[in-house]
Image: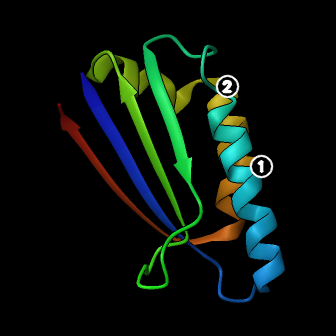
């Protein structure tokens, strides 16, 4: 199994209300991919970090293997969510992929 973990910092110019709305949209969009992408085993988005956090949104996803992760990256459903709900609103992205 391969884990794919992403941390995003939302753009500073967004208000607190906008950040909540954007984070909810990211969560809905990404978690909605479950069952649509071959090899995607599980997907969870966290948006309610503790005050000590320095990221706004976390994606925790699991794939059958590295080939499945590569397929996810270019799958049209994922690309639509990434381009419509994530990339326009994020300023920083950190990624860690690893074998679990």
Front residue of 73 and 50: 50
Horizontal side, residue 68 vs residue 73: left or right: left
Q: Position of residue 65 (x, y in %)?
A: 27, 18
Q: Position of residue 46 (x, y in %)?
A: 54, 54
Establish if 81 lies above or below 58: above
Residue, disc 2: 76
* Marks 2 and 1 close (CB-CB < 8 Å): no
Image quadrant containing the C terminus: top left
Most extreme residue toward the left is 99
Q: Quadrant of residue 12?
A: bottom right
Q: Which sits earlier in the primary sequence, circle 2 or circle 1?
A: 2
Establish if 72 lies above or below 86: above
- The disc placed on residue 48 is none
Q: Quadrant of residue 80?
A: top right
Which residue is at 49% across, 26% downward?
Answer: 72
Q: Position of residue 56 (x, y in %)?
A: 55, 71
Q: Disc 2 to disc 1, how far (Cα)?
A: 12 Å
Q: How many marks?
A: 2
Horizontal side, residue 74 vs residue 87: left or right: left
Residue, disc 1: 84
Question: SS of the residue at dot 2?
Answer: helix
Question: SS of the residue at dot 1?
Answer: helix
Horizontal side, residue 58 vs residue 62: left or right: right
């Amino acid at each position: 199994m391969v884990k794919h973990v992403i941390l995003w910092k939302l753009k500073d110019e967004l208000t607190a209300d906008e950040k909540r709305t954007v984070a909810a949209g990211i969560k809905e969009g990404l978690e909605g991919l479950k069952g649509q992408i071959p090899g995607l085993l599980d997907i969870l988005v966290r948006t309610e970090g503790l005050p000590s956090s320095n990221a706004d949104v976390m994606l925790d996803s699991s794939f059958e293997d590295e080939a499945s992760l590569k397929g996810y990256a270019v799958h049209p459903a994922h690309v639509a969510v990434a381009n419509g709900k994530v990339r326009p609103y994020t300023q920083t992205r950190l990624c860690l992929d690893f074998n679990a």
